[in-house]
Amino acid sequence: MKKILLLAMLTSSLYSQNWWTSQDSGSIYAKNTGSVLVGSFTPLGKLTVGPDDRFYNLSLVGDYNNMAKNYLQVGVTGRGFGNLQGQIIFDLIHSNNQNRLAGYNFRVSGTSRMFLSGEGYLGLGTEKPAALLELNGGPDWSGFKKALRLPPGHAIEFDASPHHFGLAAYSNELTLVVSNPTSGPFGSAFSRVMTIQPKKIIIEGDLEVKGRISEGGTTFQMTDYVATGGGTTGTIPDLAGLSQTNGNFGIGASPINKLDIAGGVAIGTSYAGNLVAPTNGAFIEGNVVIGATSPDPEYKLTVKGKIKAEELRLTTKNWPDYVFASGYQLRPLSEVERHIKRFNHLPDVPSEAQVLEEGVGVIEMQAKLLQKIEELTLYVIELEKKVDHQRLEIESADPQK
């Protein structure tokens, strides 16, 4: 009953005077200015807790005589703090003048959700961040914790001076970019790795692999295909068709064989190298050059050098059996003689100048030589007939026979 009466008297006194004081430094003070003071005589805001040497709207300050002073400051007025308006400061200052900043710990239901250490390390999901930003936890994402989400149209830049390295998210595209220092992080990129649906990965620029590429085993296998964009000189326009089921591989073509190449093939530096064909042979549709740098468009095989073979079999659609046909007109030997005296070679046979300039066709030359042999045979047969006829005439004219 006495406590109730005392409270009533205190309330009446507050309403009548609007403030009350005490000489006890640990007392609570209420002044007619609307301020409440705890352990202080000077109002520094609506609520002041602590000594009279700080200037805050809210001040919670420890005792100077303790080994350390903990204080929370909200809404700095700017006096003596370089105009730090609206700052929140939570410090742990040691008495030996070696400052060690404490941290903020934001908890929900007793679990730390965000922690900002005195060293400036920010931890999300952890109270012990070991870097300026450490993420731990997040919603489940196919067995992973989704710690960071980058929406479309946003990018993360890493300063690798003098170049830029960035990760950008576009619509249906994730891009890793290394760009030059004279442009923006994603302008004039000289190295770019992209993922665009339905393509899984696209690489713009050179790719160097130091080590083995594998799919978890000892060999490199693909179940689908690899494709590159349209290329220029020195690049592969299309690379497609490596199948795990049948092993077909195609360059510039959809493969129906173990290796299909639509275009030219160069092996080694300056076209120096080896090409080995299997036992069943190699099929080449086009011109082939051996010992030279450019093919003759009129010939399927161009060889600069000697050829050695145990047997060479050639085919042709024209052979001089027509010489023995009944309607074949055999030149008179007198005509052949005139041609030889004028041109220094047999009729229908190339001259020396032609052979030196154009070469000689093996099949064609063999046919011409056979034609001349067959004509020579006809001349000999005709000559034999004349000799036999003359012998008969001589024998019939001799009266002694």
Image (tube, rainbow, N blue to C red):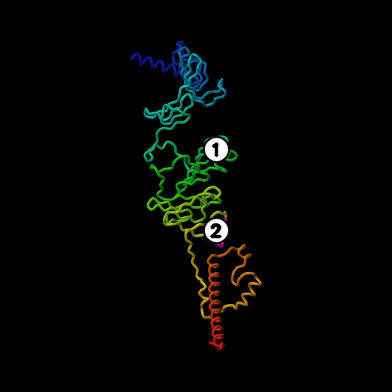
Dominant SS of magenta comes to loop
Label 1: element kind = strand
Q: Quadrant of the N terminus?
A: top left
Give the crowd class for mark 2: few <14, some 14-19, many >=20 residues within 10 Å: some
Q: Is residue 154 above or below residue 80?
A: below
Sequence-wise, which precedes: disc 2 or disc 1?
1
Q: Residues within 10 Å of mark 1 (few under 14, many from 20)?
A: many
Q: Position of residue 83 (x, y in %)?
A: 56, 24
Residue 35, how many percent across, how many down? 48, 20
Whole-number angstrom distance, CA of label 2 to CA of label 1: 52 Å
- Closer to the camera in the image, 237 or 176: 237
- Name the outermost residue toward the front: 400
- Residue tagged by mark 2? 302
Tell me: residue 15, above or below residue 152.
above
Name the amino acid, label 1.
Answer: His
The mark found on residue 164 in the picture is 1
Residue 274 position, x and y percent, is: 49, 50
- Total marks drawn? 2
Tell me, yes or no, whether the highlighted magenta stretch contains residue 34: no
- Residue range in magenta is 294-306
- Residue reaching furthest left? 1
Query: In this image, 43 relative to 112: left or right?
Result: right
- Determine whether 112 is above or below 231 in the image: above
Q: Residue furthest bottom?
A: 399
User: For the residue marked with disc 2, what is the amino acid?
Assistant: Thr
